[in-house]
Image (tube, coloured by chain):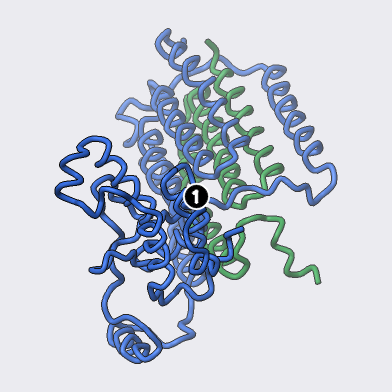
Chain colours: A green, B blue
Amino acid sequence: MELTNYLVLAAILFAIGATTVLLRRNAIIVFMGIELMLNATNLTFVTFARMHGDLHGQVIAFFVMVVAAAEVVVGLAIIVAIFRTRRSASVDDVNLLKN
Amino acid sequence: MTVSGGETVLFWVLAPLMVLAALGLLFARKAVHAAVCVVFVMISLAILYIAQEAAFLGVVQIVVYTGAVMMLFLFVLMLVGVDASDSLVETIRGQRIIGWLLGLGLVSVLVGVIAQSTFPPSVGLTAANAESNPVALARILFADYVFALEVVGILLVTAAIAALVLTHRRRLVPRVGQRQISDAKVAALAEGGLLTPLPAPGVYAQNNAMDTPALDPQGRPIEHSVSRILRIRGQERSAGRILATERAVLLEHEPELTSRRFPELSAPTDEEVAADLSGQATTPAPEQGAFPTDTTARSTGPDRSVGAAESAGPAGPTTEHGKES
């Protein structure tokens, strides 16, 4: 087996995550799609680190994880705040600026 | 570097399952199912990391992603409401088609690029991980990336404070404590309020359920012993129906004993059941006002004795339920 199999798996996961972001309306599921994309990139980083025998890829993946954790905290806080005022977690309902 | 046979098997077992779980995120109707699918993908990713000589990242993946991030997701899901399912109405025309096209295009582009490009022969991490993976990572992290690490620390503190600020809510009404609640209860006594907790629902020989009212000392059902929610939903069962069933069962199994020991139970007459129902209608129910209960209509269910009783019984007290026709 070649290491490129891991890259193909990461590409498929990334595309599924991106499609989730495009298609789903529930803000929380959209967020999970973003998490899936970040995880797919992490798999790519780890695979390339192994391919090149260089641990810098793993360090970058580590930083991606940290930033993703911070992003999730802020994003979910925003979702909760929006849900409190609008009683909805759907991304289509957030059109306060429209009128 | 060659990939071992065990790793190949691991990959081909895990990869299809991961893709299936990721598709579950895309298609699951309920957000909780999607979250469980993502948890599966993340744990599988951790296994793949460990297989790819990234033991530290594998552990961090489990601790940070499945342990903290996904649990936070589930927590917010419970907070926002598990039942909040997706609406299937398209607000932007053709969004579904365009989304699918973009997704398929993205996967074909990415896979095409990976298939087309030639990669250098794999080196493997045996040399780099000579003094164990975490130690080697730490040497890079705390030498080349010190500044980035500091910035990330600031980012984490900022994110924590941001979450606190975003979800903080100012108190708009005065705090309601135990004292205020008891004062309000005493003040409401004049309007028919209750000081005590509401009576518990009924326990009978045949069933012990939330949806049947308890009986008061006179044997009349206490309407408000059943949860208000059940009464609004119309899921309450009338006590008359349960009692009539019990009488029928008793009579069927031990006719002599029943008639000797409970002479009043020997014949569930129409008047008895009707009195049961009328007693139910006259029982004071404090919160009943706005919600018309339709216990009478439901008691004409499969139970034959009550059904017969109602058709023959006096129409006076039952018509006020508004369901008799």
Residue in the foreground of this view, choosing between B114 and A49:
B114
The chain that hosts pointer 1 is B
* Amino acid carrying mark 1 in the image: Thr
Q: Measuring 48% from the left and 76% from the top, which residue is drawn there?
A: B169
Residue B116 vertical position relative to residue B39 in the rendered view, above or below: above
Residue B147 vertical position relative to residue A52 in the rendered view, above or below: below
Residue in the foreground of this view, choosing between A9 and B4:
A9
Q: Measuring 45% from the left and 69% from the top, which residue is drawn there?
A: B164
Q: Which residue is mark 1?
A: B300
Residue farthest to the top, as pictured: B5
Mark 1 neighbour class, 10 Å CA radius: few under 14, some 14 to 19, many 20 or more: some
- Looking at the image, residue B61 sits to the left or right of residue A44; the answer is left
Q: Dividing the image into 4 quarters, which one contains the C terminus of chain B?
A: bottom right
Q: Position of residue B97 (x, y in %)?
A: 80, 36
Secondary structure beneath label 1: loop
- Looking at the image, residue B110 sits to the left or right of residue B174; the answer is right
Q: Position of residue B288 (x, y in %)?
A: 46, 72
Q: Please identify the quarter of the rendering in which residue A94 is found.
A: bottom right
* Residue A14 at least partly seen: yes
- Looking at the image, residue A90 sits to the left or right of residue B148; the answer is right
Q: Measuring 20% from the left and 46% from the top, which residue is drawn there?
A: B259
Residue in the foreground of this view, choosing between B215 and B182:
B215
- Looking at the image, residue A31 sits to the left or right of residue B159; the answer is right
Q: Measuring 78% from the left and 47% from the top, which residue is drawn there?
A: B90
Q: Position of residue B92 (x, y in %)?
A: 81, 49
